[in-house]
Image: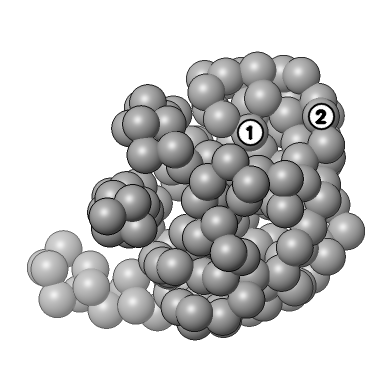
Amino acid sequence: MSRLLTALLAALFIPTAHAALAVGAPAPDFTTEAAVGGQPFKFKLADALKQGPVVVYFYPKAFTSGCTVEAHQFAEATDKFKALNTTVIGLSNDNIETLKKFSVEACRSKFAVGADAAGKVIKAYDVELKMVPGTMADRVSYLISPDGKVAAVHASMNPDGHIDAMLKAAEKLKK
């Protein structure tokens, strides 16, 4: 298949991600059930921001190919984020039981994933996947600064690029 035809098919069948919150916008506060290393806990954005910046990344569905790749990439970069005093949490509308498993298998027990089964956080950040509203999040990553504002955003259905964009933004914020 030619590159042009492949590109055209991708444009037709692979949705593009959109970021509803702009840099400088206030990030909606939230509390959600989360898991890291298979252990559930309550994640509170306001509490995490007291420790430093937070990457809040939204993804469509646990255990799907792109979401697993992205989780592996965030897991591999966890030490770099920690060195920048930055917390990472992934959010989807999966339930906590699914995410307890995903936090071990895909996230390699390195960072938390939050359950937004009712879609409240997804709606607050306006990152619903337009093709299936109310059921999945779009693939969008935000860096939230300690003052509660969006410091950076990366929106792409391709999982590649999210980690680099958030690391660069966290480095810039640290300076």
How many numbered marks, from 0 up?
A: 2
Q: Which residue is nearer to you in this view: 109 or 22? A: 22
One can see residue 167 in this view: yes
Element assignment for label 1: strand
Query: Label 2: which residue?
Result: 41
N-term-proximal mark, 1 vs 2: 2
Instruction: Please give the name of the residue rendered at 49% of the width and 79% of the height, measured from the top-left corner.
Output: 24
Element type at marker 2?
Answer: strand
Above or below 49: residue 140: below
Q: Residue at x 27, y 55 (%)?
A: 175
Residue 155 percent across, percent down from the top left = 43, 69
From the viewer's side, name the closer residue of 67 and 7.
Answer: 67
Looking at the rendered structure, the kind of residue marked 2 is: Phe
Whether residue 141 sits left or right of residue 104 in the image: it is: left
Q: Quadrant of residue 162?
A: bottom left
- Report how far apart the C-alphas of labels 1 and 2 lie in the structure: 9 Å
Q: Is residue 57 left or right of residue 46?
A: left
Q: For residue 21, which quarter of the picture?
A: bottom right
Report if the CB atoms under discs 1 and 2 are less than 8 Å apart: yes
Residue at position x 42%, y 31% in the image:
82
Give the crowd class for mark 2: few <14, some 14-19, many >=20 residues within 10 Å.
some
Name the residue nearer the viewer: 107 or 55.
55
**Residue at left offset 11%, top offset 68%:** 2
Q: Position of residue 169 (x, y in %)?
A: 33, 58
Location of mark 1 (residue): 112
The three-letter code of the residue at mark 1 reads Ala
